[in-house]
Image (cartoon, rainbow, N blue to C red):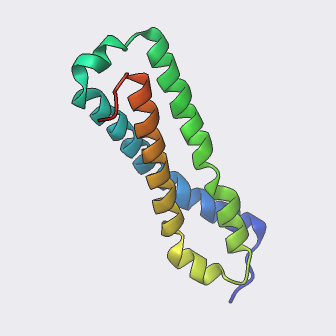
Amino acid sequence: MTEVTARDALSDAIQYWERRRILYNVVLIAVVGIVFLGNFTEASRHLNFDTLQTLFVLAVLANVAYCAAYPVDIAAQLSALRDTWLRWRWGLLAVGLIFAAILANFFSRGIFGVIAT
């Protein structure tokens, strides 16, 4: 095992996570789009400038939340478990993506006035 510096771990984390941020945002946009289009009649009644501002703020907050992976990734890379972590960190991405998609579904249903059936 080679010694990893904090700089190396940070560089690797940026390279790994920023490439996957696009997937993260595409999935969240798809979830909101599906909720909107799947309930177009009701959802379109709720679409106004305030709604767009709310969606923008939530998109920014979702991307801030995405950054929560960085401290976990860097700490794991600096540990003795680095090699194992590098093979399995996709699991953190998967869990985070599922969690974010569920939150996006929950919030978009509320914003667009979709009643659970």
* Identity of the residue drawn at 46% across and 32% down: 107
Expressed as whole percent of the image width and height from the top left, the position of residue 41 reads 22, 17
* Quarter of the rendering containing residue 7: bottom right
Q: Specify the quadrant that holds the C terminus.
A: top left
Is residue 106 positioned above or below 76 on the image? Answer: above
The answer to whether 28 appears left or right of 43 in the picture is right
Quick one: 43 or 11, which is closer to the camera? Answer: 43
The answer to whether 73 appears left or right of 108 in the picture is right
Is residue 48 positioned above or below 18 on the image? Answer: above
Expressed as whole percent of the image width and height from the top left, the position of residue 82 reads 65, 79
Quick one: 75 or 98, which is closer to the camera? Answer: 98
Quick one: 15 or 66, which is closer to the camera? Answer: 66
Is residue 49 positioned above or below 26 on the image? Answer: above
Expressed as whole percent of the image width and height from the top left, the position of residue 109 reads 39, 30
* Identity of the residue drawn at 56% across and 32% down: 60
* Identity of the residue drawn at 60% across and 45% down: 65
